[in-house]
Image (cartoon, helix red, strand yellow):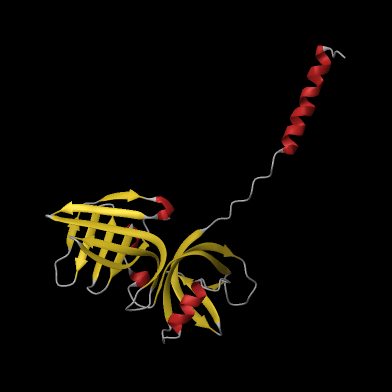
Amino acid sequence: MRFSRPFCFALLPLLASCQVFTDKPTAPVIEQTRMQGELSLNAGQLLFRPCQEQRQFLLKDDSADGLSSDANSLFSDGHNSLYVDMRGQLQANAQAGIDGQFVPSQVYRVQAEGQGCKDINFARTLLRASGHAPDWSIAVSNQGLILNRVGKEPQALPYLEEQLPEGRLNLSSEANGQRLELWVAKQRCVDSMNGAVQHMSAELRLDGEVLRGCAYLGGARND
C-alpha cells in the first residue's frame, strides 16, 4: 500500500506525541543539607539545634547502629549535650514546640568534648585526623597541612593528594628531610580516649612509624 506525501506528514505530530508519553519519569532529587549543631536529650527524644540558631528539630534516626545509638551511648556517660556534624533532609513535623525534623543520611562526627560550634577553623578545614599513644593530629587546608605531635613544635608542610576508590584518600609530603603519608578511608571510627565517633579511619606513616586514629571531612569539603 502506498501513502501520499501529505498523509505521511500528517502522522508526524502523532508519532512525536507517542514518544513524549513513553519516556520514563525522572526520579525526584531529594535535597540533602549538611549542618552542625548541638544534640540534647529531652523526654527520650533527641533534639537538634543548629549552630548560632534558635530553631530546634526532632532527630529522626531509625537505624539500629546510627547516630541515635552513638548519641545515647555518650549521654549515658553523663554528658548533657553533644556536638554533631551531619548531612540529611529537613522535613516538617507537627509536634508542638519544634520547627521540624531532621533525618540524617551521613554522620561526619558526634562528640561530647571539643570546640564544637565555636571552632572558627572548621569552615576552612578540608580534613582533620588525630590519634593517640602518642598523641598526634593533622589539619589539612588549601594552604597545606599542619602536623602536631606531643612534645614537638607544629610543622606546616606542603602535600600531594591522591583520591582513591570508595572515597579513600592518600596525602603525602616530603619536606624537612622526612617522609609523611596519611591514609584515610570511609569507616566508622571511635576515639579511644573520649568516645567521639568520626566517619573515617586514619593511618599516619611518619619516617617508618605507623600511627592510627580517626578522621573527618571539614567544612571546606563534602564527600
User: Residue drawn 33% across and 74% down?
Assistant: 114
Q: Does 210 sit left or right of 222 as displayed?
A: left
Question: Viewer-proximal residue, 142 or 163?
Answer: 163
Task: Give the farthest residue toward the bottom.
Answer: 78
User: Residue drawn 49% across and 72% down?
Assistant: 67
Which corner quadrant of the image does residue 195 belong to?
bottom left
Q: Does 40 sit left or right of 11 as displayed?
A: left
Which corner quadrant of the image does residue 79 belong to?
bottom left
Residue 141: x and y, percent?
29, 55
Image quadrant containing the N terminus: top right
Task: Give the farthest residue toward the right.
Answer: 1
Question: Viewer-proximal residue, 94 or 143?
Answer: 143
Residue 191: x and y, percent?
35, 74
- In the image, residue 200 sits, relative to residue 23, either above or below, namely below
**Visible residue check, residue 203:** yes
Which corner quadrant of the image does residue 192 belong to?
bottom left
**Visible residue check, residue 121:** no
Image quadrant containing the C terminus: bottom left
Residue 14: x and y, percent?
79, 28
